[in-house]
Image (cartoon, rainbow, N blue to C red):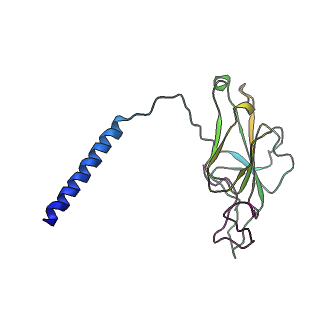
Amino acid sequence: MRIASGFIRLFASLSVISVFSSSQAAFQAPQTNREKMNINTNWKYNQGNVTGAEAATFNDASWGTVHLPHNFQTLPITGGTFYRGIGWYRKHFTFNNSYGNKIITLYFEGAMTVTQVWINGQTLPIHYGGFSPFCFDITSGCKFDGTDNVIAVKLDNTYQTQVPPEHPDGTTTEFELYGGIYRD
């Protein structure tokens, strides 16, 4: 009897899964003209604070080139020490006029810890925290005439009492909070 009742429960579960799978297969997302562009390659990077790096006309030619994801660490970590400070990223790109009627959204999957972003020198809201994704509508700041657009990102992973998971009393967390745009 136990085997039979177990078999009946298993059969009923498989039937429900089968019905659920059939209904999922019938669902199709509506067609949109949404386009996703991966901009993870060829970012300019500078470790340390730089005055004026948010300006679209700032000369970043001497900065290194990195690909995302990227973190501030460039040397092996020894003795529990690592860089906590400010780092800058800049990305150059162009749009032609076919993008002028679209909404352009900049999406970060993760950046540590306090993130300031500019598009062509236009300030966007500050994001606090390193573990949650965030995005900005950058449409109004973009140029759609084939000329250079610049995203500037200033990251600060110094000790931040107001940003979890840092401890407000100054004690250390149980893990390292590396700075950088560490996800796509």
Q: Is residue 134 left or right of residue 32?
A: right
Q: Residue furthest left?
A: 1
Number of marks in picture: 0
Q: Indicate the quadrant where residue 177 lies.
A: bottom right
Along the line of sight, the residue nearer the viewer: 160 or 169: 169
Q: Is 182 in the magenta?
A: yes
Whether residue 68 sits left or right of residue 126 in the image: it is left
Which part of the image, by quadrant, shows the N terminus?
A: bottom left
Magenta stretch, overall SS: loop
Give the extent of the magenta segment: 157-184
Q: Residue at x 17, y 61 (%)?
A: 5
Picture layout, residue 38 above or below residue 172 = above
Q: Image height check: is 110 above or below 24?
A: below
Residue reaching furthest to the right: 51
The answer to if 125 sits in the magenta stretch is: no
Residue 179 percent coordinates (x, y): 70, 59
